[in-house]
Amino acid sequence: MMMSQELTLEPVEFSTIVQCRHHWIIEAAEGPLSQGVCQICHEVKDFQNSIVDADRDY
């Protein structure tokens, strides 16, 4: 005995989140932070100019 099944298609919602592969243009270092702007999506982000806040007495 062969059974038949009815195929029903339901709409599916897709979340299309496109992530930018940023190409940062960072302003010159003048102080602890420099502002960068993505050349592609124009996102703005602050970048630290120094990894370590240490005295540099040399």
Image (cartoon, rainbow, N blue to C red):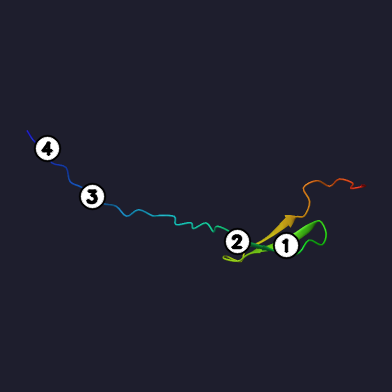
Q: CA distance from mark 1 to mark 4?
A: 66 Å
Q: Residue at x 78, y 61 (%)?
A: 29
What residue do we see at 8% from left, 36% from top?
2
Badge 4 or badge 3: first in the primary sequence: 4
The image shows residue 38, relative to residue 13, as above or below, that is below
Which residue is label 3 attached to? 8
Secondary structure of the residue carrying numbered label 3: loop
- Asked if the residues shown at circle 3 and circle 2 are in contact, with their CB atoms under 8 angstroms apart, the answer is no
**Mark 1 surroundings within 10 Å by alpha-carbon count, few (fewer than 14), some (14 through 19), many (20 or more):** some
In the depicted view, which residue is nearer to us: 16 or 4?
Answer: 16
Residue 32 in percent (x, y) is at: 81, 56
Q: Earlier in the sequence, mark 3 or mark 2?
A: 3
Instruction: Quote the CA–CA distance across marks 4 and 3.
Output: 16 Å
The numbered mark, 1 or 4, whose residue comes first in the sequence reads 4
Mark 3 or 2: in front is 2
**Residue 5 percent coordinates (x, y):** 16, 42
Residue at the spot 48% in from the left edge and 56% down from the top edge: 17
Identify residue for label 4: 3
The residue that label 2 is drawn on is: 23
State which tag comes first along the sequence, 1 or 3.
Answer: 3
The image quarter in which residue 35 lies: bottom right
| Label 1 sits on residue | 35
Q: Residues within 10 Å of mark 4 (few under 14, many from 20)?
A: few
CA separation in Å, label 2 and label 4: 57 Å
Placement of the N terminus among the 4 image quadrants: top left
Place of residue 53 in the rendered image (x, y in percent of width and height, measured from the top left): 84, 47
Q: Earlier in the sequence, mark 2 or mark 4?
A: 4
Residue at the spot 77% in from the left edge and 47% down from the top edge? 51
Q: Secondary structure at mark 4?
A: loop
